[in-house]
């Protein structure tokens, strides 16, 4: 595992640096697409190595590989955001940005790397502010009735795993299997930024809340 890990360390750094150069608006779309393909291949290599680390019960290696996996996914999502803007698909671009932020958060949970990711966290938050309008989100208030741990599949309240922490290359999540819906409210700073208000009604017509374009009414019949 040690030698394999060293090899992947080098491969990760080289591929990440190579592709990160294209994560901005001015670079050609073809290089951004090519970078996504390179990163997809890297992701597969990392996953294969992680499987071996898990088999060997090497938790440190597995979590380090999870960290690489999360960072690779982050860069893929950022590149996809730029590609979506070029294809005039701002709503998809938003989805990719939110995925990038989530995956980067996962990288921070996976492995302790001090503050080296702070500039990347900052970059994504600045992009959110500069590239997108202020949006409104729906926040869903729920009362969970049954919670399951993603690591051991047993009742989350009864096990020792803590959500957000990495265990043998996997991030623990608490899966809400059953819940009661308490309320839905409109907020500016939501837990889930995918949950946004898509359109607003203005008089007789509806606008796309992101692009401000008028949504043509669907023909009836
Ligand atoms: Zn558990």
Image: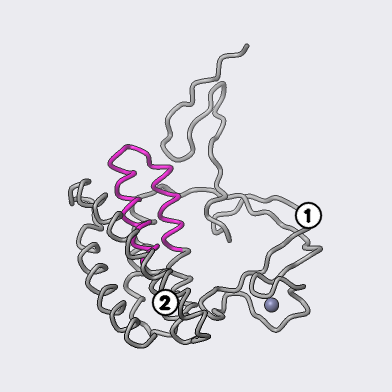
Which mark lies nearer to you, 1 or 2? 2
Magenta stretch holds residue 170: no
Relative to 90, residue 79 above or below: below
How crowded pointer 2 is (Cα within 10 Å; few <14, some 14-19, many 20+) is rated as many
- Viewer-proximal residue among 129 and 91: 91
151 to the left or right of 11: right
Relative to 79, residue 47 above or below: below
| x and y percentages locating residue 43 in the rendered image | 37, 64
Magenta stretch holds residue 91: yes
Q: What is the magenta range?
A: 72-101
Q: Determine the secondary structure under disc 2.
A: helix
**CA separation in Å, label 1 and label 2:** 39 Å
| x and y percentages locating residue 78 in the rendered image | 34, 57
How crowded pointer 1 is (Cα within 10 Å; few <14, some 14-19, many 20+) is rated as few
- The quadrant in which the N terminus is found is bottom left
Question: Which residue is under mark 2?
Answer: 65
- Viewer-proximal residue among 202 and 21: 21
Q: Could you tell me what secondary structure mostly forms the magenta stretch? A: helix
Q: Please give the name of the residue rendered at 74% of the width and 58% of the height, measured from the top-left corner.
A: 142
Q: Please give the name of the residue rendered at 34% of the width and 51% of the height, measured from the top-left corner.
A: 80
Ligand 1 placement by image quarter: bottom right
Quarter residue 44 falls in = bottom left
């Amino acid at each position: 595992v040690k030698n394999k890990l060293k090899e992947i360390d080098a491969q990760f750094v080289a591929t990440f640096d190579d592709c990160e150069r294209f994560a901005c608006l001015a670079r050609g779309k073809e290089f951004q697409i090519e970078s996504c393909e390179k990163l997809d291949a890297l992701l597969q290599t990392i996953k294969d190595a992680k499987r071996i680390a898990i088999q060997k019960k090497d938790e440190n290696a597995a979590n380090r590989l999870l960290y690489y996996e999360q960072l690779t996914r982050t860069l893929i999502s950022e590149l996809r955001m730029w590609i979506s803007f070029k294809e005039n698909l701002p709503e998809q671009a938003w989805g990719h940005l939110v995925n990038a932020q989530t995956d980067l958060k996962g990288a921070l949970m996976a492995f302790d790397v001090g503050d080296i990711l702070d500039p990347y966290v900052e970059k994504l938050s600045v992009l959110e502010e500069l590239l997108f309008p202020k949006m409104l989100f729906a926040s869903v208030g729920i009362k969970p009735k049954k919670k399951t741990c993603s690591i051991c599949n047993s009742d989350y309240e009864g096990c020792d795993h803590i959500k957000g922490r990495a265990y043998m290359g996997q991030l623990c999540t608490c899966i809400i299997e059953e819940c009661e819906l308490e309320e839905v409210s409109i907020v500016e700073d939501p837990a889930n930024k995918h949950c946004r208000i898509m359109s607003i009604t203005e008089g007789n017509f509806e606008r796309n809340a992101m692009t401000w374009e008028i949504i043509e009414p669907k023909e009836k019949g």
